[in-house]
Amino acid sequence: MIPGPFSYHRPTTVADAVKLLSTLGDDARPLAGGHSLVPMMKLRLATPEHLIDLHDIAGLKGVTRDGNNVLIGAMTTQHELLASEVIAKSIPVLHEAALLIADPQVRYRGTVGGNVANGDPGNDMPALMLTLGAAYRLEGPNGVRKVAAADYYQGAYFTAIEAGEILTSISIPVPAAGHGHAYEKLKRKVGDYATAAAAVVLTMSGGKVETCAIGLTNLSETPLLADAAAKAVIGTSLDAASLKKAAAAAQAIMAPAADARGPVEYRKHVGGIMVMRALQRAAAKAA
Amino acid sequence: MNDMTPTREERSAALEGMGCKRKRVEDIRFTQGKGNYVDDVKLPGMLHGDFVRSPHAHARVKSIDDSEALKVPGVLAVITAETLKTVNLAWMPTLAGDVQMVLADGKVLFQNQEVAFVVATDRYAADDGINKVKVEYEALAPLIDPFKSMDADAPVLREDLAGKTSGAHGPRKHHNHIFEWTVGDKDLTNAAFSKAEVTIKEMISYHRTHPSPLETCQCVCSFDKIKGELTIWGTFQAPHVIRTVVSLIAKLPEQKIHVISPDIGGGFGNKVGAYPGYICAAVASIVTGKPVKWVEDRIENLTATSFARDYHMTTEIAATKDGKVTGLRVHVLADHGAFDACADPSKWPAGFFNIVTGSYDFPVAHLAVDGVYTNKAPGGVAYRCSFRVTEAAYCIERAMDILAQKLGMDPAELRLKNFIKPEQFPYHSALGWEYDSGNYGTAMRKAMEKVKYAELRKEQAAMRAAFKRGETREIMGIGVSFFTEIVGAGPSKNCDILGIAMFDSCEIRMHPTGAGIARVGSKSQGQGHETTWAQIIATEIGIPADNIMVEEGNTDTAPYGLGTYGSRSTPVAGAAIAMAARKIKAKAQMIAAYKLEVHEDDLEFDIDGFRVKGLPEKFMSMKDICWAAYNSVPPGMEPGLEAVSYYDPPNMTYPFGAYICVMTIDVDTGVYKVKRFYALDDCGTRINPMIIEGQVHGGLTEAFAIAMGQEIRYDAEGNVVTGSFMDFFMPTAVETPHWETDFTVTPSPHHPIGAKGVGESPNVGGVPAFSNAVNDAFSFLGSTHIQMPHDYWRNWAAAKNLGVLAA
Ligand SMILES: Cc1cc2nc3c(=O)[nH]c(=O)nc-3n(C[C@H](O)[C@H](O)[C@H](O)COP(=O)(O)OP(=O)(O)OC[C@H]3O[C@@H](n4cnc5c(N)ncnc54)[C@H](O)[C@@H]3O)c2cc1C
């Protein structure tokens, strides 16, 4: 558990960081909180020759409200996300989910940008970003572009990010007032990635579901948006039959790996339960 | 006497002796990060060694090419089996009478086996070097399932044993067989079974797990060429044994080997044995002339140094219809991995597993244990238990529940009915032990009253009915465990390690000012010996515990001891401490008699000094006696106040306890909640109730982890799939249940202070309580036995197999 040799760079502007990344090529990796990257390096599953530490770049931190969007700087830590009033007020589901990430020590260093950029199917934030319809701002040698979270994840650790690009911020449309939300995560212990987890953001009208989005964590190579499951509950009062339908529709797109958390069948089974529980809890919270 | 004269209570309290909840003196440094662990040892010019390890579970090593590794800046040497052969150290003896490769010699037999040792100027360079060593392997068929070990066509694992039809423990039946060990009367037992009104039979597995102390195994070896002396700082639970082993295998004179165990960050059995890292670091130091440090990382610790358990116990009980047990028959298949590196006393290939009759009066019993090789890491050690006692306790406690279920009897009632009765002690068990003391019924009934057992059963019945009506998806289990341990190895008549009897020792030296130092052959790894040993001495000789410094772990200064494991410290070293203190006291009495000008027999000991019987004002404090020992001893007496005691215990001690666990399980997810856990321990005389409570909390947390998910699991190819704390269940404070502790006191009649040892009881007794709770929860759905560990997905699988999940 000793990393290989690497050189360390600490640029102070995004432009410099992008320049370093593009000139050093494939052997360079941005370093944020290091809580995903460093463990991989210690196992020598990642052996970057250059680490480009993003901590000294001004302007990559903080949560702000910009009209109907909330902007989260990539280097905002999960702890800072939890401390943010903007988040607690406008996107409480992120607050709820961040509390389920690892433990306080990890959250003090782990960043939201690192969590969503990484492409680790076990990370919790990506499925929430899908559910919330977030977009990522990427800055690279060819300028700035925006990629929807829904288009970002391509496979385990494979994302739409191009060589030389840095994710600088996340923009999230503020969910409707009175929305209901829940993140149900089954894990074996504090600090564990999800055995199965489901995020739900919905609105209710007259006791019936009006809009709904469902995201799934660690149930496939990428985070999933369970569209068919969400459709299955729209217009329903979340009676037992529609809940079951939603769970089945969600299970149809799940393809988890068998690991020490359990066999595939179990993970899909509890995946369905997480969906049902998240729907019920979200509905109970909706105005 | 004036008002300032302290009362007897005050004088007694000032000693902070036995029974006092004295705060742990070692915590002052531990809680400030000022402990001194092996990794804190930094010597000038020190080098670092690290292992190239096998990715295969079973393979032939075709070649090892170190040329690229030696080009890595900082890499100084690459040691292989070929290097070690030049000093005759390619193989080393194990404590179990087997031999083990230090570095792969022609073959590898388990994943992560040590293949080459890279020595470099720092740990980073060593690791870079490892990645450049090219090893060519030819994969062989792995043997992972112990039940297939003795198949006719099973691959030959140990080519070095070819043609050897007997091993250290008798005949071998197969090329992958290690030993067969039988105890008890087979014919009488078979007869009891053929006559039995009721019998049960179940294969009860105790899965492979690992002690996983926070501090991994590590050492620093420093060879002084000029003096020809080797100094080893290591995480050793038994430093003297390590010194003797090193002397025997390295052929160095024992006085020229200095073994030092500094502060140790937990051992739990993991640090009893000798590992390739120690040998390689020592050889590397001899070769390079520099100190060499070896520090295991977490993955190495979990996958290479000794595991625990892996016992598969086919268990049968014979009984009468009304629930009186009449016979016990157990066959164990013991998976030892690639080498038998069990840390058991020499004559006990399956440890003290013959305590498997537990707390019950079995008239006859028979036990057979077959040890086999597989392509897994070698072991196994006693993970916070006396040798194989936790396996035995799990076996009998699970089996008693299965019998209760078959008889339709309450499991607590069945136990009460079959307990060894107080008047039967000393009790001779059918499998050969002499239990020292016990009062089982009292303990069990106290536990049942405290948890309101009858009400719990009613609550459970209501919940079961609600489940059947479809009103809840939760089921409730009540797990009862009544364990008897056998600890304090042990009497020289039956216990030795490599021929050395398992005594322990203490040397006390009192200084003129009434302070002293006690050096002990045990070695604390967190148990708090510096605190409790001083308390024993305080009570015995009347000097405040604060004035007694306790020192352990340095083989140059501590008297020879067999170390700390198997709950032996209090039963053996604790006795040696009391006996040494009594020698001090005896000499002190002679000095006091001389100074007070009376006959010795006219003196009585009174808390902190000697008093002339009938003349209360004629008193000499121990403090003053210490001073007198250095200037005015009786004529003919040697000055000074020192004593040494080597204690060979007449018998083991038999701590016991009653544990009750209440749990609910959500059948849809398998998620369990421990609602309550009550632990009553009887460890005889209680030296420090606070430390006992701490030990119980720690041991219960381990038991919880083991029963509910902690395992070392291999896939079919022999890859370890639980090789880090990501998957190896190490509960945090969040998952850990709340513990309720309680006690009764039944002193050991043969121990000088009546103490029995408590460090391991909670691990031994806790595992069956948790497992019985899970099994009890599912029993009304028609299940008799569900194997551990009971993690979420397995609970779900159990529910699914019982047909209670919605389609
Ligand atoms: C014990 C433990 C438990 C954990 N449990 C959970 C959990 O339950 N749920 C969960 O979601 N996470 C968990 N994590 C992961 C943790 O949240 C990480 O901190 C997070 O996923 C990555 O953030 P980071 O800032 O540490 O990123 P880093 O580790 O620094 O980087 C991760 C990857 O993203 C890249 N990267 C980082 N920032 C950027 C950027 N701005 N632009 C482009 N690429 C970038 C890096 O190059 C690297 O490849 C756990 C971590 C630990 C150590």
Image (tube, coloured by chain):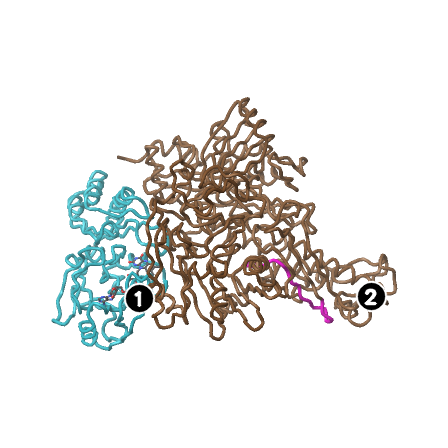
Chain colours: A cyan, B brown
Q: Nearer the viewer, residue B626 or B264?
A: B264
* B489 and B399: which is toward the camera: B489
* B492 sits left or right of B133 in the view: right
Q: Is residue B518 within the magenta segment?
A: yes
Q: Mark 1 points at which residue?
A: A34
**Please, is residue A126 above or below residue A263 in the view?**
below
Which of B321/A257 is in front?
A257
Determine which of the numbered discs, if any, sits on residue B637 in the image. 2
Q: In this view, does B533 lie to the left or right of A24?
A: right
Is the CB of the residue bearing disc 1 within 8 angstroms of ligand 1?
yes
Report, in whole angstroms, how far the alpha carbon at label 2 lies from the one at label 1: 70 Å
When the figure is inspected, residue A87 is found, relative to residue B754, above or below; the finding is: below
Regarding mark 2 in the picture, which secondary structure is present there? loop
Looking at the rendered structure, the secondary structure element under dot 1 is loop
Residue visible at 64% across and 60% down in the picture: B520
- Asked if the residues shown at circle 2 and circle 1 are in contact, with their CB atoms under 8 angstroms apart, the answer is no
Residues shaded magenta? B510-527
The reply to whether residue B528 is visible in this rendering is no
B704 above or below B154? below
Ligand number 1: quarter of image: bottom left
Q: Position of residue B678 (x, y in %)?
A: 51, 45
**Identity of the residue drawn at 54% across and 68% down:** B29
Residue at (71% x, 64% y) in the render: B543
Amino acid at the residue labelled 1? Gly
Task: Specify the quadrant that holds the N terminus of chain A.
Answer: bottom left
* Kind of residue sitting beneath label 2: Met
Left or right: residue A264 compared with residue B357:
left
Task: Give the dominant element type of the magenta stretch: helix, strand or loop.
Answer: loop
